[in-house]
Image: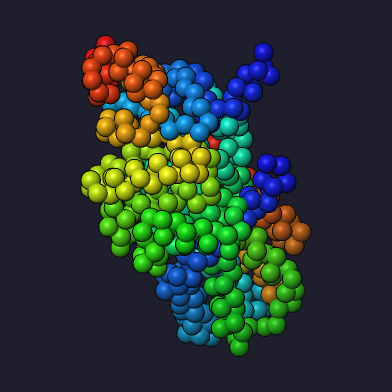
Amino acid sequence: MEATSDLDRASAALVVERLTKIYDDGTMALDELDLRLPAGSFFGLLGPNGAGKTTLIGAAAGLVRTPAGHVFVFGHDAAVDLESRLLVGVAPQEVHLDRFLTARELLAYHGRYFGMPRLEAEQRADELLEVFDLTVKGKTKPNRLSGGMRRRLLIARALVHHPRLVVLDEPTAGVDLELRHELWRYLRGLHVEQGATVLLTTHYIEEAEALCERVAFIRAGRMITEGAPAELIDRYGGERLEDAYVEAMRQ
Amino acid sequence: MSTTELRIRQRRGTIALAARETRRLLALWTQTILPPILTAVLFLAVFGGALGKRIHDVEGLPYLTFILPGLLVMTVAGQAFANCSTSLFQAKNEGYIEDILTSPLRPWQLALSYMSGGLLRGLLAALTVALLALPFAHESAQPALTALALLLTGLVFSSLGVITGIWAETFDQHAFVANIVITPLALLGGVFYSARTLDEPWATLTRIDPLYYIVDATRSGLTGFNEAPEWLSLLVTAAVALAAFVTAATLIGRGWRLKP
């Protein structure tokens, strides 16, 4: 039984089992949450503010302490097995970038923190600067970049060490429409061409509908439902995912 | 991935973070390297030059020679502490520590990387002060002992800096430790006086200050004069260094005040 369970965990990109998180102020962010992300999927996590999305992402990336429950990344326990960190690339919701480094250094140092040899990390940094149209800003420090550029740099940073699971916490929050569509294009490429599993949280339902193969609705730290967008529309009614979301939250 | 490969990656990551810390302190050299050198030179000038001739020899040593080891210890201690506590506090306060916390580095490797910047800053400043003081100082009696004592000083205070950086949630808390803990420890550590000449309770207060043993070991290395046995001084310093390092690594491992 245990062996089967381990195999199941290893075959999925992310397995969350009965994960509970209560913050010091008593806020219950996650309440015995269960979730399974198939490897290779583009998965959307939707829910209102305070639903527990960022906490869940933090638990997967090692940014949040979770004394109750388990998170497995490709079979590695995220709480104790440091190899799991190499498999996850996370772009947090808030943009916090090391102000002592230039954009290129920031990417290269990230790669090196994750164990890449220096030359390889620098080559990867150049490659990502080009992909995210930041090459001319390579020698610029983050505080001299525009908001959109900083957001792109943050996403680029998450990708430096070739993670198999890319976690993006509201990557298009506060960015203009043009950049949002550029990011969509890149994320699709990342998923289709490079085979990365993507976990995306967003408040833009149309974004999830456009990008995600599977979507989960969570509220108050608990899973409400999960499935392909079309399945959720069938389940909750309406014509679009947004209708299903509103109906699911209302129930 | 094999355990060996993970270890290699963690080692590379540790070196990279240490390199980042070095880069930061060199980039900010007017704030990190220059001020401690200036302070120590002023101490040397005032106590050695202006006041030194009016102060009798202490324990048979010219006053400047007597205080120089303590000034070196104070320089290493203050700079190692300030570098680690400030760098970690900034990373935490500005949020970019998440890049480090998501990395595969082990807690002790994170602590050691942050400490490396403090160690380098402290030892660079001490070396410069020592070179500037060379014309006025005696030849070092035991250079290896001096180097070991200063290295242990750096380890103790860079670990304390990491602990403070983790603990402090405001600039006030950060400054509190520097002003209320580190400065009194330095002033009560026998830098400017011999503990044997003190009345109670000052003699006892000095002898329970770990800095006293560090200063004494350094003084023994530089001048050959010591009040406590060298082995005791090194043992106390090494024990404090180990305890501080283990505490820093444990706090990082538990995510205390670093992770919600």
Instruction: List x then y, in percent, for residue A12.
Output: 55, 27
Above or below for A24 versus A156: above
Q: Looking at the picture, does residue B41 appear above or below residue A34?
A: below
Total count of labels: 0
Tell me: A146 left or right of B57.
left
> Residue at point 48% right, 27% down?
A37
Q: Nearer the viewer, residue B211 or A40?
A: A40
Taking depth in this image into account, of B251 and A65 the one nearest to the observer is: A65
Q: Residue at x 42, y 74 (%)?
A: B30
The image position of residue B148, as x and y in percent, is 70, 65
Q: Left of A111 or right of it: where is A91?
A: left
According to the image, what is the colour scheme of the structure? rainbow
- Residue lying furthest bottom in this view? B135
Residue at the image point whose x is 31% and y is 14% from the top: A234
Q: Is residue B206 at least partly visible in the picture?
A: no
- Residue visible at 71% across and 78% down in the picture: B140
Q: Quadrant of the C terminus of chain B?
A: top left
Task: Specify the quadrant that holds the N terminus of chain B.
Answer: top right
Answer whether residue B106 is visible to the viewer in this image.
yes
Q: Is residue B149 left or right of residue A167?
A: right
Percent x, y for residue A95? 35, 48
Q: Image quarter for residue B133?
A: bottom right
**Foreground of the two, B100 or A13:** A13
Q: Position of residue A202 (x, y in %)?
A: 31, 34
